[in-house]
Amino acid sequence: MPSLTWIVIAITSLAASTTAAPASLAERTVSPCPAPGKTTRVYSSGLYTIFPGTPKYAAPPNNDLHVQYNAETKLAIKQVAAFGEFPKAAKKCSLGWVQDDAKSGTLVVSGDGRLTARQLSGFPAFPAGGENGVSAQDVQRYDAGKVRKEASPDFSGWDREIRTAAHAAAGSNFTCATNMYVLLEKSNGTSGNVFMKKTKGSGVYIEFSC
């Protein structure tokens, strides 16, 4: 029987998907290079929720992070985070995330909060990769090949933090590209649920220099 916390998170996440969608791929602008010796961040322009257990189901993109795996029921919820556009001179692209002050943001972690973040080799073309969303089946062919660089963001215990905090994902060293797509999933096959409400002060980002 799923816990009340997990049910509340699932309902909250589904409700969030009915809110205004993030900017479409066509509306992106190129981020400027930071000053020499500095870095800058590009936050995700949309999070596409996919369900491996229902591979043809496509949901519209939303702004909230929600990744889950339950070892008992085998329920898996993954997301693809879209980032861009990056300048041609971008280098040292790495994944991170920021949680907002507890008075303004919502971060809930149940069970194991360790995730795997894997760079995809591409993304379904518009309109499949636009406001209509994508499915696990759409994404599968991009989760293979030469790229497959991984990072390990760990949300465990951070839902107890009161203040805003930024976190770098361990092992993050992605291949910079004009547009980047990162698959977020539960790692190690252990049960866990991570939900982070998108606010002005929170989100998943790619940090880079030039």
Image: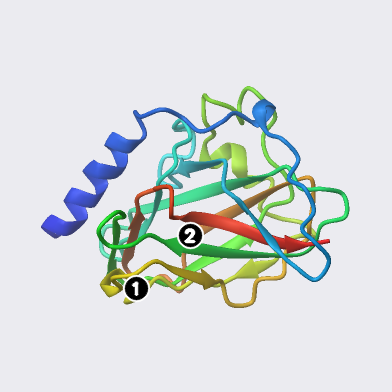
Decide which of 84, 154 is in the foreground and name it: 84
Which dot, 2 or 1, sits closer to the camera? 1
Marker disc for residue 158? 1
Residue visible at 37% across and 59% down in the picture: 100
| Residue 98, horizontal then vertical, whole percent | 47, 62
Judged left or right of residue 140, residue 76 is: left
The kind of residue on which mark 2 rests is Glu
Marker disc for residue 185? 2
Other residues around mark 2 within 10 Å, as few (<14) / some (14–19) / many (≥20): many
Count the numbered circles shown.
2
The kind of residue on which mark 1 rests is Trp
Q: CA distance from mark 2 to mark 1?
A: 18 Å
From this view, report whether residue 202 is shown above or below residue 38.
Answer: above
Mark 1 lies on a secondary structure that is helix
Can residue 1 be seen by looking at this rendering?
A: no
Other residues around mark 1 within 10 Å, as few (<14) / some (14–19) / many (≥20): some
Residue visible at 28% across and 71% down in the picture: 162
Residue visible at 46% across and 51% down in the picture: 78
Mark 2 lies on a secondary structure that is strand
